[in-house]
């Protein structure tokens, strides 16, 4: 282990060079493609014809109220219909994926221990997919959906606990009545609309953008490393929004407490902001438009080098209202080099 740690860069270079040589060799020999995959039994080389297109087409399943799908590459799509069914195409070199509809739970497991690396060109595989058919009026106790590189698409659906995760694919879901929901993608975009009496929502990306509707959500935590975040709605929501370099936009928000923070992006918030609202950007601008009148809010606005305006009037930093009776709501805004704008009755 010590040798590997001391010489990791030499090993990395060796693997890269070896891979390049193999790629060029395959290219010059006119190979159609191939792959290497590793599993518990060792390292395997697979030619294109070694892949098996495992297909499922079952359109008369017993009703199910839970769905668990875990797969490496396929897209996952829910299709409203008049019956319960499953359709899938899952190319694999390591054996048939597992699936079951026992005990009211639809399970698809196509995420084996294999690690696949394409060599000698590209394997000509069909598009991987999993499609779940269900009556449009059906409700679900739980949905757990996981894919590494595929997209996830869930139309308007009623579910208690909802979880969707993709590494590089996008996620588009509209979920009603959920109690908890967790949606994440590393580099794909996320579009999520939630409604109903929902206590907890978490949406997270590394570089993908986020668009989310928060109707009925009483608590939401939304974050992105470098993607932009756009939120709408809310129902007295306790809301936390964080981004490193993306823009934050929250429109027609109805919040009971709100924290929005980004390093280099702008922050733009409009709506009925109750309790304490805190907005911060290191180098971006901060713009706030509160639905209430000025006498309902106290505020503390600071900027080191930017301008501050309140209801169109330019003020110095820190900007605070004239001393008076304590207000029931508080707005805090801070930026180092950006401007701050605060307006009321919007």
Image (tube, rainbow, N blue to C red):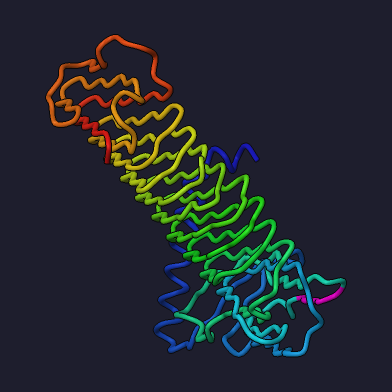
Q: Left or right of 211: which side holds 301? A: left
Residue 307 horizontal/vertical position (percent): 14, 26
Task: Give 6 or 239, whichever is nearer the viewer.
Answer: 239
* Main secondary structure of the magenta stretch: strand
Determine the residue positioned at 79% across, 78% down: 63
* Quarter occupied by the C terminus: top left
Is residue 137 rendered magenta in the image? Answer: no
Residue 7 horizontal/vertical position (percent): 52, 42
Q: Left or right of 107: which side holds 214? A: left
Q: Is residue 265 above or below residue 280?
A: below
Determine the residue positioned at 59% across, 52% down: 182
Q: Is residue 295 above or below residue 189?
A: above
Locate residue 159: give its quadrant.
bottom right
Q: Read off the magenta span.
A: 98-102
Is residue 100 rendered magenta in the image? Answer: yes
Q: Is residue 261 above or below residue 175?
A: above
């Amino acid at each position: 282990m010590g040798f590997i740690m001391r010489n990791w860069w030499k090993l990395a270079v060796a693997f890269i060079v070896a891979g390049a040589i193999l790629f060029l060799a395959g290219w010059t020999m006119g190979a159609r493609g191939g792959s290497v995959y590793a599993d518990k039994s060792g390292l395997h080389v697979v030619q294109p014809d070694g892949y098996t297109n495992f297909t499922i087409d079952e359109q008369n399943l017993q009703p199910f109220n839970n769905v668990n799908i875990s797969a490496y590459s396929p897209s996952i799509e829910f299709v409203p219909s008049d019956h319960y069914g499953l359709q899938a195409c899952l190319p694999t070199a390591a054996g048939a994926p597992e699936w079951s509809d026992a005990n009211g739970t639809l399970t698809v497991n196509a995420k084996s221990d294999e690690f696949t690396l394409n060599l000698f060109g590209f394997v000509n595989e069909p598009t991987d997919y999993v499609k779940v058919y269900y009556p449009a009026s059906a409700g679900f106790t739980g949905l757990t959906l996981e894919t590494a590189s595929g997209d996830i698409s869930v139309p308007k659906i009623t579910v208690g606990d909802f979880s969707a995760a993709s590494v590089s694919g996008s996620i588009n879901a509209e979920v009603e009545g959920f109690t908890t929901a967790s949606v994440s993608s590393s580099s794909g975009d996320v579009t999520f609309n939630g409604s109903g009496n929902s206590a907890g929502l978490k949406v997270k990306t590394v570089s993908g953008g986020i668009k989310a509707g928060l109707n009925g959500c009483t608590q939401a935590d939304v974050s992105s490393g470098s993607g932009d975040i756009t939120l709408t709605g809310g129902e007295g929501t306790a809301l936390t929004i964080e981004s490193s370099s993306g823009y934050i936009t929250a429109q027609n928000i109805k919040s009971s407490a709100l924290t929005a923070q980004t390093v280099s992006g702008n922050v733009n918030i409009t709506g009925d902001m109750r309790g304490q609202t805190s907005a911060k950007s290191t180098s971006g601008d901060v713009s706030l438009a509160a639905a209430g009148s000025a006498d309902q809010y106290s505020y503390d606005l600071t900027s080191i080098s930017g301008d501050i305006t309140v209801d169109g009037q330019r003020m110095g930093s820190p900007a605070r209202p004239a001393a008076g009776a304590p207000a029931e709501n508080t707005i805090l805004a801070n930026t180092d080099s950006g401007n701050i704008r605060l307006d009321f009755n919007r």
